[in-house]
Amino acid sequence: DAGVTQSPTHLIKTRGQQVTLRCSPKSGHDTVSWYQQALGQGPQFIFQYYEEEERQRGNFPDRFSGHQFPNYSSELNVNALLLGDSALYLCASSPYSSGNTIYFGEGSWLTVV
Amino acid sequence: AQKITQTQPGMFVQEKEAVTLDCTYDTSDPSYGLFWYKQPSSGEMIFLIYQGSYDQQNATEGRYSLNFQKARKSANLVISASQLGDSAMYFCAMSLLNTGFQKLVFGTGTRLLVSP
């Protein structure tokens, strides 16, 4: 049973560019959330997707957007990259009906230069 | 507002000993969930244990147990018989009913170092 998978694992982008990160949820999970974890901090909630719609959003600018596909996989897009966007981006999946099972992927390390 | 506080930036323990990692939480919502995750240097956030606010008994998962003291709003993680592979960052997190239990708020983490 595959867990949460994310790609790419590492990437380097230049300021002003755009990036797309991808996530496949654990089998049986229909909800995907994205978190940003800056160095030395705990993860911060970006947004949650269920039934292909953004359901909740944290305190992140509109440069951060996402999408969920019919197979429950998800993308996180960040436009106009800033140096401060350098972080580990974590994807979490869970069943919408249950809040006690939230699993994370290995993350995507983004460096903006 | 919901908040998780982890006051121990770092903890040291010898192999085979038990260690307690502290976590206190703040919320006015009566329905919430408490989680502990382990994060090795690779970055993956590994689920360890979950406790619901209405669970009567403390959660246990193998060598991990959660010491849930509701009146004190604490949810400490106890790791018994520490192993070298337990060296990692440990995060306490909380979810609330009013967010469908789908949004986690994390503490700042505790770095655990297990020595031989």
Image (cartoon, rainbow, N blue to C red):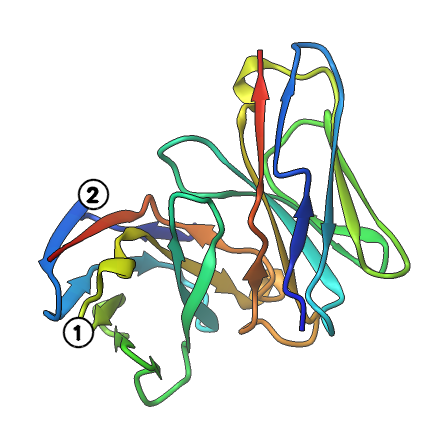
Residue sitting at x 12%, y 64%: B15
Which of the numbered marks, if any, corresponds to residue B9?
Answer: 2
- Looking at the rendered structure, the secondary structure element under dot 2 is loop
Residue pictured at 44% horizontal, 72% vertical: B30
User: Which residue corresponds to the image point at 73% horizontal and 71% vertical from the top-left?
Assistant: A27
Where is mark 1, residue-wise? B81
Q: Nearer the viewer, residue A46 or A93?
A: A93
Instruction: Give the alpha-carbon distance from disc 2 to disc 1, as whole Å.
Output: 21 Å
Horizontal side of B48 relative to A12 (left or right) equals left
Can residue A30 be seen in this snapshot? yes
Q: Which mark is residue B45?
A: none
A44 w.r.t. B99: above or below: above
* Drawn side of residue A82 relative to residue B30, left or right: right
Q: Quadrant of the C terminus of chain B?
A: bottom left
Q: Residue furthest bottom?
A: B56
Given the image, on which type of amino acid does mark 2 rest? Pro
